[in-house]
Image (cartoon, rainbow, N blue to C red):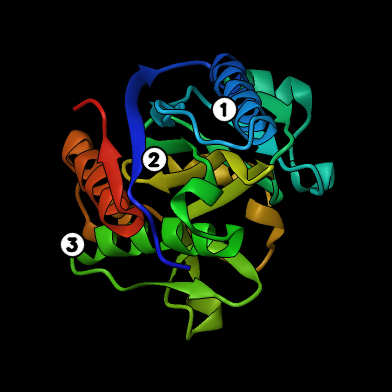
Amino acid sequence: MDKLSYSVLYQDIGVRDYKEVWEIQEKIFGELIRSKLREQQINSDKENPLPGTLIFVEHPHVYTLGKNGSENNLLIDHIQLQTKDAKFFRTDRGGDITYHGPGQIVGYPIFDLEKMGVSLKEYIHGLEEAVIMTVSHFGISGSRLDGATGVWLDTGMNSKARKICAIGVRASRYVTMHGFAFNVNTDLNYFNYINPCGFTDKGVTSLEKELGERQDFEAVKLLVKNNLYKVFNLNWINK
């Protein structure tokens, strides 16, 4: 399918609690679906349809489990969670368990894929591509791993394969929510308390670890935003 120009409201909301942002997503997601259903009922596109929304956020320490994931992949109990100053949530996204925390770019695109002219598979591929383009800016070769979403390094060497970006998405009526988590300056020790994305034989990494020094978080964020713009032919309705 040919990608169509898609208008998007960009929101960088800083550091916010996971549950609070989940509720923000749900509200926008519901509004977008209701607007779409109204358009379909009158069999006409509105002159000013609701735009998509792209939220960038950092979360305090939190573990989230996808709807088909196993809680056994959380390797510590709830008392130990408290000692790590972390929370745990079951979610309605795809994928298994992952970690969110400071130094990680979490992106929540709430998009209408039909208006974009892409399938769900193409959309996930596009999220991966934007991060692959971003890490290539730093001379890092990112790639996809068969049977797993996200962006990985050294996939050709199974013992060294490690994930730098996780992806977990929910879609209804071709409207998306949840999204991706890209490790920039992330404290990777927090991944020791889970089987990341359900894997017991794969590692996790970050830009900071790969490059040997802390990265300019805001500059990396801008790179990701610009690469999403290129991959999906977005039209920002704000700067």
Q: Amino acid at mark 2?
A: Thr
| Badge 2 or badge 3: first in the primary sequence | 3
Left or right placement of residue 223 versus residue 38 in this view: left
Quarter assignment of residue 41:
top right
Secondary structure under tag 2 reads loop
Foreground mark, 1 or 2, reads 1
Look at the image and tell me whether residue 238 can be seen: yes
Q: Work out whether 108 lies above or below 174.
A: above
Residue depicted at 83% across the width and 47% down the height = 70
| Badge 3 or badge 1: first in the primary sequence | 1
Which quarter of the figure is the C terminus placed in? top left
Q: Circle 2 sits on which residue?
A: 186
Q: Amino acid at mark 3?
A: Phe
Q: Work out whether 37 lies above or below 214.
A: above
Q: Circle 1 sits on which residue?
A: 32
The tag on residue 138 is: 3
